Amino acid sequence: MTEHPKADLRYPIGTFDFREPVTPEQRADWVDTIAGTPSKLRASVAGLDPPRLDTPYRPGGWTVRQVVHHLPDSHLNAYTRCKLALTESHPIIKPYDEARWAELPDSTRPIDGSLVMLDVLHERWVALLRAIPAAAFARTCHHPETKTDLTIDRLVATYAWHGPHHVAHITELRRRQGW
């Protein structure tokens, strides 16, 4: 991760930075981070009432509620992309407009369903990642918008960053607001 000035509320833990080669220890750490994301998200929103859940984490940013709903949306796509890369030869993955997803009516609902969804999704995803052989992490998919080939290693690294990135949006908001 690349550090950003503390004033940049978009990247409280820095921007994503992926470098190869990947070591087995890095991969295991990433999978452990993915495994721990649901509990860290739950802790970050514990005790927040609806007005606080509907507070943007930064000016012009998503609300805490939208961030919570975004995580299972995004991670479900990542899980699917991993499974496609494992079962097809270099599949083209489906991009989605995450900003428009965050505007859909289900992003205004209570957060409990999304917390449960993230728990169950990560349980399956981590079980899969811990069961596949090391060579499988080199399997690829193609992202047509960015015109990049992504290895499963890169997907796992991305989402090991992505979960803590959004959890930090919430924890940093709480710290700044004294919640």
Image (tube, grey):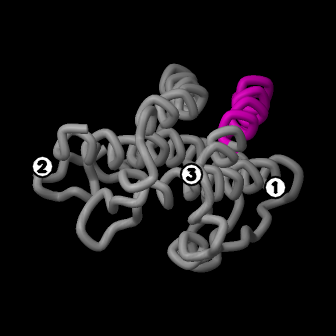
Residue 38 screen position, x and y as percent: 57, 33
Residue 47 seen in this snapshot = yes
The secondary element bearing badge 3 is classed as helix
Residue 135 seen in this snapshot = no
Real-space Cα distance between discs 2 and 1? 37 Å
**Is 123 contained in the magenta span?**
yes
**Is 21 contained in the magenta span?**
no
Q: Nearer the viewer, residue 141 or 169?
A: 169
**Which residue is label 1 attached to?**
84
Taking the image as shown, residue 118 lies to the left or right of residue 39, namely right
The secondary element bearing badge 1 is classed as helix
Picture layout, residue 59 above or below residue 34: below
**Which residue is label 2 attached to?**
6
Picture layout, residue 102 above or below residue 139: below
Q: Residue at x 41, y 41 (%)?
A: 48
Residue 37 screen position, x and y as percent: 53, 33
Which of pointers 2 and 1 lies earlier in the amino acid sequence? 2
The three-letter amino acid code for the residue at tag 3 is Leu
Q: Which mark is residue 26?
A: none
Picture layout, residue 24 above or below residue 48: above
The three-letter amino acid code for the residue at tag 1 is Leu
The region drawn magenta spans 118-138
Taking the image as shown, residue 136 lies to the left or right of residue 100, namely right
The three-letter amino acid code for the residue at tag 2 is Lys
The secondary element bearing badge 2 is classed as loop
Real-space Cα distance between discs 3 and 1? 20 Å
Q: Residue at x 24, y 68 (%)?
A: 59
Taking the image as shown, residue 25 lies to the left or right of residue 5, namely right
**Which residue is label 3 attached to?**
71
At label 2, counting other C-alpha atoms closer than 10 Å, the crowd grade (few under 14, some 14-19, many 20 or more) is: few
